[in-house]
Image: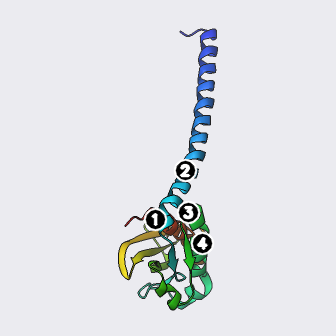
Amino acid sequence: MINGNMRRVMSVFLAVGLLVGAAGCASNRATGSANNVQNTATKGESHKYVMMPATFGEHSGVTEAVKAECHMEPRLNSSISSATSKYGVALDVVSTKEELNKATDIIDVKFSNVVSHEWSFLSFRPTSTAAVSIDVINNGKVVKSVTKNIRSRVAIGACGRLNKIADSAGVFVAKWVSRVRY
């Protein structure tokens, strides 16, 4: 059996260990994320990306009503713009093809396979899914490409779910582009 004094000593050591461990984790997290942003900005200085505003792909399957009511494209573009500064990606959004053709490093972002309302097995509410496709084009050739399927289950209404998908897709685009090397 452990006596009362031994319990107090063990609880003090445990408390001090938890406090020191938590302080160490917090400081590591803060410096690690700052270093990652700084490192990606330093590595990515040679690439200044240009993109047209993101759109729905040719075979996205999205209805005109969803395009008009949900505003996925503006939400995606806004999310990309705010997330690129967080991840240290130099990105200019241009409005004309002429400006785009002058650039050497181009990002092409499109939504595909958008399903605004679907029921899944054993679910109590509908879900929404969409895929975001990213192409990195260097001097007219696609050098890197990725497609990510994103699903949202918790939001009120189809537009709420699709807007959450657009927001998280923008963060994914910025994060993925910050890590692309070619």
- Which label sits on residue 81? 4
Q: What is the CA distance from the residue labelled 4 to the residue labelled 1? A: 14 Å
* Residue designated by label 3: 88
- Which label sits on residue 35? 2
Precedes in sequence: disc 4 or disc 1: 4
Asked whether, in this view, residue 122 is left or right of residue 31, the answer is left
Single out the mark in the foreground, 4 or 2: 2
Q: Position of residue 31 (x, y in %)?
A: 58, 45
Q: What is the CA distance from the residue labelled 4 to the residue labelled 2? A: 21 Å
Callout 2 environment at 10 Å: few (<14), some (14 to 19), or many (20+)? few
Q: Are marks 2 and 3 in contact (CB under 8 Å)?
A: no
Precedes in sequence: disc 3 or disc 1: 3
* Residue designated by label 1: 176
Identify the residue at horizontal 36%, vertical 78% (top origin).
Answer: 142
Precedes in sequence: disc 2 or disc 3: 2
Single out the mark in the foreground, 2 or 1: 2
Front in this rendered view, residue 41 or 128: 41
Helix, strand or loop at mark 1: helix
Helix, strand or loop at mark 2: helix
Tell me if residue 146 comes above or below residue 56 in the rendering. above
Q: What is the CA distance from the residue labelled 2 to the residue labelled 3? A: 11 Å
Residue type pointed to by label 1: Trp
Asked whether, in this view, residue 133 is left or right of residue 76, the answer is left
